[in-house]
Image (cartoon, grey):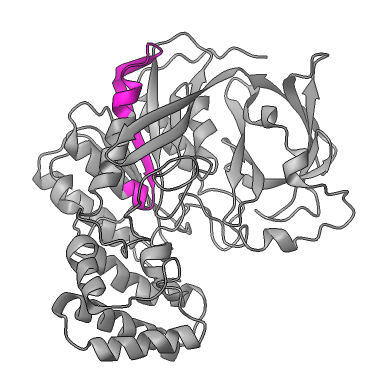
Amino acid sequence: MKMKNSGRYTFALLVTLFATSFTFPGVQRKAAALTVKSLNVINAEVAIDTSYYGNYRITANHLLGIDRFITDDGRIAMLFSDYSTGIVRRLFADTNDRFVMGPGFNTATPAELTLTFIKDIRGRVTGVSLRNAQGVNQFAQRVVLREERVSFKNTDANLEGTLLIPSTKGPHPAIILLHGSGPLTRYSFGPYPHFFTSLGFAVLIYDKRGAGSSSGTRMDASTGASMKNSLYPDELAGDALAAMQKLQKYKDIDPGKIGFWGSSEGGMLSMQVAARSPKIAFAINSSGFMEPLWQTFRYQARAIPQSKGLSPGEIDADSVFVDLWLEVARTGNHWEDFEKGQKRLNDMGQFWIFQSRGPFTSLEQLRWDWNHILTFDPLLALAKVHCPVLAVFGELDPLTPALRTSENMRRVLTKAGHKDFTLNIFPQAGHSLSILPEKNRMAPDLFKTLRTWLLARIQVSRSPVLQ
């Protein structure tokens, strides 16, 4: 498959490297500026009843999900997901208990679908009525789920999360979701928490160390400046393993059927965790890099500007600066040239690389990044993975080179004699695996691929209790 390069905003070094677990450009900073005509749009934080979140069933084979999603500016959004059509879009409040979905991920008009949540006399949500633009009505009955707060510890971090448990008879298989880089919370996973519960899995989502209700200092691809005495991504892998150990103690969880799914940096991390424990039942990498980290930054230096439509000259300038940055980090030479280039980008308002922590202030800091983060190579651990592996990538991803990453995984796993791995590149899909340029639905067959692959390997109870 011939790949196209795409993307700008200067490869967002330790910031946007796999910036969020589930990101649709425009939903974060544009949310506050939304103007929705002909709708009585009310404050989302007032309008959203937490009992709306969950799974809904139209037929036995047609399930929906309503997920809570926290945008970068801290706003609460509701995501509607149809696992049959692949539609994943934001819902906008019209009146209490009634919401609308527009044609784009972050647009409300013209309304393509109106959802009215139905409650019983005690105020419990029992289902949702759906009416499309042609006036066709459907009803989806609520599927009963149970939620529990979960706390666990690893090194300096006390981690807080939520366990979503199916209503079917246990013990249940479980899947732990892993974030992309940055200060992400348990509500950063888009449609995936309730997609996996729709399959009969218990799902653990937790706030990343140093984010939300979790304590600890984060050293990931967005915070190298702390200069901790550790190597990336050891602490994050330790947190994930601590999450698994916590679930193994639950009577409702089958300890032999716990696996991991991760997006972006979390996709890479799912492979690292699987290499460290033979007790992991499966691992899914969604858009995670699989090459030395510095090589991925070099790819981003051209792919991101190209996806934003920058001129060849601007793309070349960004690429030259990234090469300089990596060379100074590796050798310690030409620090003064790097300082000048860094200041130039900052003065031009293009300082996306280091925006989450400010510029590098010393050569020591830059060299520390090289030795502790940039030289990390996930392929070394990949050869030690023995559980079933699924990897899914987007052909037009400007952050992870899909074809190169897929071939790296194929080469390493084949050489290691791995017997059960599946690699899939989705045409016209970006980093979040939504279809470009519209971004209003996931890649065709993405949900089907995940569902078929998982249920072929993990047995679940598929008779949900309805409200």
Residue at point 26% right, 84% down? Answer: 324
> If the image is split into quadrants, where does the C terminus sit?
top right
Which segment did they paint magenta? 244-267
Q: Is residue 261 magenta?
A: yes
The quarter of the image holding the N terminus is: bottom left
Q: Residue at x 31, y 55 (%)?
A: 219
Q: Residue at 29% of width from left, 18% of height from top?
A: 255
Quadrant of the rendered image containing residue 419: top left
Judging depth in this view, the residue of 176 and 367 nearest the camera is 367
Toward the viewer: 281 or 121? 121
Give the total number of marks visible in the rendering.
Answer: 0
Q: Nearer the viewer, residue 168 or 273?
A: 273
Residue 424 visible within the image: no
Q: Is residue 299 visible?
A: yes
How far across and how far down the image is residue 320, in percent?
Answer: 31, 86
Where residue 32 appears, x then y in whole percent?
71, 60
Q: Is residue 415 left or right of residue 97?
A: left
Q: Examine the rendered structure and indicate whether residue 151 appears above or below residue 108.
A: above
**Residue 49 position by quadrant:** top right
427 within the magenta span = no
Q: Dividing the picture into quarters, in which one does residue 282 lie?
A: top left
User: Compared to 302, does 181 lie above or below?
Assistant: above
- Rendered location of residue 314, percent (x, y): 44, 88
In the rendered image, the vertical position of residue 113 relative to residue 400, given as above or below: above
Q: Is 121 left or right of 299, judged from the image as shown?
A: right
